Amino acid sequence: MSSRATTGIPEPRPEAPGQDAGLPADDATVDLPELPSADEMVQLLDEQGHRHPHPFFDAYLADITADELRTFYRDMAVTRRFDDEGTALQRQGQLALWVPSRGQEAAQVGSGRAAAPQDYIVPTYREHAVARTRGVDFADIMKLFRGVSNSGWDPREHNFHVYTLVLAAQVPHAVGYAMGIARDGAVGNEDPARNEAVLGYFGDGASTEGEVHEGMVFASSFTAPIVFFCQNNQWAISVPSAVQSRVPLSRRAAGYGFPGIRVDGNDILAVHAVTRWALERAHAGSGPALIEAFTYRLGAHTTADDPTKYRAASEEAEWAGKDPLTRFEAWLRAEGIADDAFFADVAAEGDAVAAHVREATLALSLSGLDTSFANVYGQPHPLVDEERRWHEQYEASFDDAGDGTH
């Protein structure tokens, strides 16, 4: 196969309605593909791994190379192996908590790989695959879940913000950052390298929080260069998305005055194309867009959760058949882009990454919470001192021999 993916789609890319469509000077009309409605589910790769053309979004895959496609799969598969290791470490008592991302790899890699290096990404707390696309060492993520750091990586180094554990709290921050770069003139420049945007993630549960509404109001009012990326994984812990919203979440964008797109979140090609479109639009200065990636978390919300208490086994089995890795592997094999040797190499890398993460995690010091208490305020505070004393008494209650060991 050639170095390019065989999309067979001509250039230039279609323009979204409301933008300059590049009509001829004599005002002759031309037929341009239209942006899908907010209710249409954009899908390019079905559950069986069959590729279907799309009149609008195919153009955003025309320059994707075979090497990039293989990287997409590697990102997804290695992240899943890392994710399994995270669950194992938590079950063995080495992490305070773990937030799995199994089933959402296509939504994360497809969108993360669409971002330009200068774009700033603001995650929630389960965007492990997005972190990989930004060069974050998986071992650094464990510093947060082991309780030894509030982050684990330098956001400025990776243009990847710290994880936010408070539901939806990151959305106003993402919008504020986007408003700032717009004021700095980082949109609408002829040189693409001078244009920036923000890619902000949240889940379907967070979509009902006030911070999301407030963030979208400000983003629309100030034409902020931000792409709101909602991973609708069907369940906000134990509440189904159908209870949270009677209409597709993508429709909500219309109320704020910007486009909303619903995409099959288990289809990495569709997610990548849609996100490239939205970011390109933001770079041009056309403002925000909302992407609803319709996906499914195949595991628990966190390791503190038991999904069997609120989800039917038949539902989980149905979505297991829509696994994003399985369908993408089928297409890569059918197109001759990847073979057995490639997939074996990916599996070996996954095991190596998992071993690296385990070794690094176990080496992290567990020196207690003294530094956490000390970092609350710049000066000593009586309430913090009281809480520290309570914590010391609580820890002492677990001493078996009375000698400070646990």
Image (cartoon, rainbow, N blue to C red):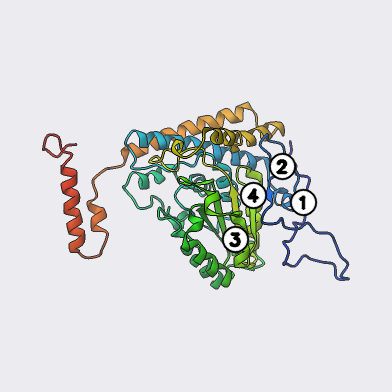
Q: Is residue 291 visible?
A: no
Residue of label 4: 263
Q: Amino acid at mark 2?
A: Ala
Q: Earlier in the sequence, mark 1 or mark 3?
A: 1
Residue of label 3: 252
Residue at the (78%, 48%) spot, across then down: 9
What number is the disc on residue 312? none
Q: Quadrant of residue 187?
A: bottom right
Residue of label 2: 5
Q: Nearer the viewer, mark 1 or mark 3?
A: 3
The percent coordinates of residue 46 (x first, y second) are 68, 39
The percent coordinates of residue 79 (x first, y second) are 50, 39
- The residue carrying pointer 1 sits among few (fewer than 14), some (14 to 19) or many (20 or more) residues within 10 Å by Cα, namely few
Q: Nearer the viewer, mark 3 or mark 4?
A: 3
- The residue carrying pointer 3 sits among few (fewer than 14), some (14 to 19) or many (20 or more) residues within 10 Å by Cα, namely some
Residue closest to the far left? 402
The percent coordinates of residue 348 (x first, y second) are 51, 29
